[in-house]
Image (spheres, rainbow, N blue to C red):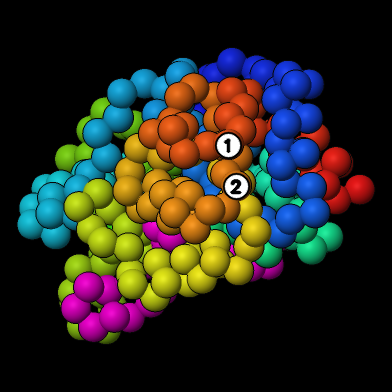
């Protein structure tokens, strides 16, 4: 597995919890909301899971306002994005895709930036927080791929990645931020069109999710008969608001997560277990 971070084997749900969830969701269409916990089995650590180390992600204000922060971010991301880029969907992602392909799930709202739902075959995916694979200029709006930027950064910083060490030995956060000792001397690439600041198309802490994404996500929830949450602690409002919205609308809510979530008071069924075994079992029961 890629990162140096490890996590406990994903526990299977109890038969009683699973039966409760199936009974509640049977015959209903679902909106699925996922967080970092669904990707841990693919080798991407989560932020707030029971085995996660403390993390302090960079804020939007730091990135925009401080060239040193920006240099540190791009140096770490230049190493880390390659790990995220070669991760593959796990059983949980495939189960969600199966639910959608069978017509049970209408689509996925994900707080993740890893694009693993798309790779697993999900078609209607709302990337709430953007994606690591795209980069945008904050001045002129030019969009380029992270792969194209990597070629420019390699040219500007020859030998940097090799000097850091094997990617497999570097700890990587969910947003592709690698933990490396020194970023001194790393040269940041500016926008090739206007010379402005380039930023990953990821919603940072302190930054708002674009309105059109939020509206699309609410529309997806409103189309469905129930909400299934998988692998999110629901700590941040950007995801939790869909749970409170579903509850206000009188929709059943099922939450699957290792450890407590801030949405638990709104859940009809709460399953404290791994997303891979639980979603696989739900897909087998709901989308045979």
Relative horizontal placement of residue 245, taking residue 68 as reference (left or right): right
The magenta segment is: 122-145
At horizontal 53% and vertical 20% (from top left) the residue drawn is 6
Q: Quadrant of residue 253?
A: top right
At horizontal 50% and vertical 43% (from top left) the residue drawn is 35
Look at the picture and state if 224 lies above or below 73: below
Res 135 seen here: yes
At horizontal 13% and vertical 50% (from top left) the residue drawn is 62
Relative horizontal placement of residue 12, taking residue 189 as reference (left or right): right
Res 114 seen here: no
Density class for disc 2 (Cα within 10 Å; few <14, some 14-19, many ≥20) is many
At horizontal 42% and vertical 72% (from top left) the residue drawn is 215
Residue 172, position as x, y percentages in the image: 43, 34
Density class for disc 1 (Cα within 10 Å; few <14, some 14-19, many ≥20) is some
Residue 252's tag is 2
Element class at badge 1 = loop
Residue 228, position as x, y percentages in the image: 61, 46
User: Do the numbered discs 1 and 2 sit on residues whose CB atoms are within 8 Å?
Assistant: yes
**Spatial CA span between label 1 and label 2:** 6 Å
Camera-side residue of 231 and 198: 231
Labels 1 and 2: the sequence-earlier one: 2
Camera-side residue of 111 and 150: 111
Residue identifier under label 1: 268
Residue 279, position as x, y percentages in the image: 72, 38
């Amino acid at each position: 597995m890629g990162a140096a971070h490890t996590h406990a084997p994903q526990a299977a749900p109890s038969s009683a919890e699973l039966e409760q969830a199936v009974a509640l969701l049977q015959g209903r269409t679902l909106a699925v909301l996922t967080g970092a916990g669904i990707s841990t089995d693919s080798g991407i650590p989560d932020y707030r899971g029971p085995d996660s180390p403390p993390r302090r992600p960079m804020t939007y204000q730091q990135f925009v306002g401080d060239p040193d922060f920006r240099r540190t971010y791009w140096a770490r991301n230049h190493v880390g994005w390659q790990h995220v880029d070669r991760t593959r969907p796990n059983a949980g992602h495939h189960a969600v895709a199966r639910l959608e392909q069978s017509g049970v799930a209408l689509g996925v709202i994900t707080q993740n930036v890893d694009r693993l739902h798309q790779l697993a075959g999900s078609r209607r995916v709302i990337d709430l927080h953007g994606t690591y694979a795209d980069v945008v200029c904050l001045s002129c709006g030019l969009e380029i791929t992270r792969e194209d930027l990597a070629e420019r950064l390699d040219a500007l910083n020859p030998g940097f990645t090799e000097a850091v060490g094997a990617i497999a030995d570097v700890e990587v956060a969910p947003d592709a931020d690698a933990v490396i000792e020194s970023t001194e001397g790393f040269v940041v690439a500016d926008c090739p069109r206007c010379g402005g600041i380039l930023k990953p198309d990821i919603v940072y802490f302190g930054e708002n999710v674009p309105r059109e994404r939020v509206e699309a996500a609410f529309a997806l929830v409103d189309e469905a008969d129930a909400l299934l949450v998988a692998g999110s602690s629901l700590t941040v409002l950007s995801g939790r608001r869909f749970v409170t919205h579903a509850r206000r609308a009188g929709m059943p809510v099922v939450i699957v997560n290792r450890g407590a979530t801030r949405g638990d008071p709104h859940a009809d069924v709460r399953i404290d277990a791994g997303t891979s075994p639980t979603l696989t079992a739900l897909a087998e029961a709901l989308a045979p």
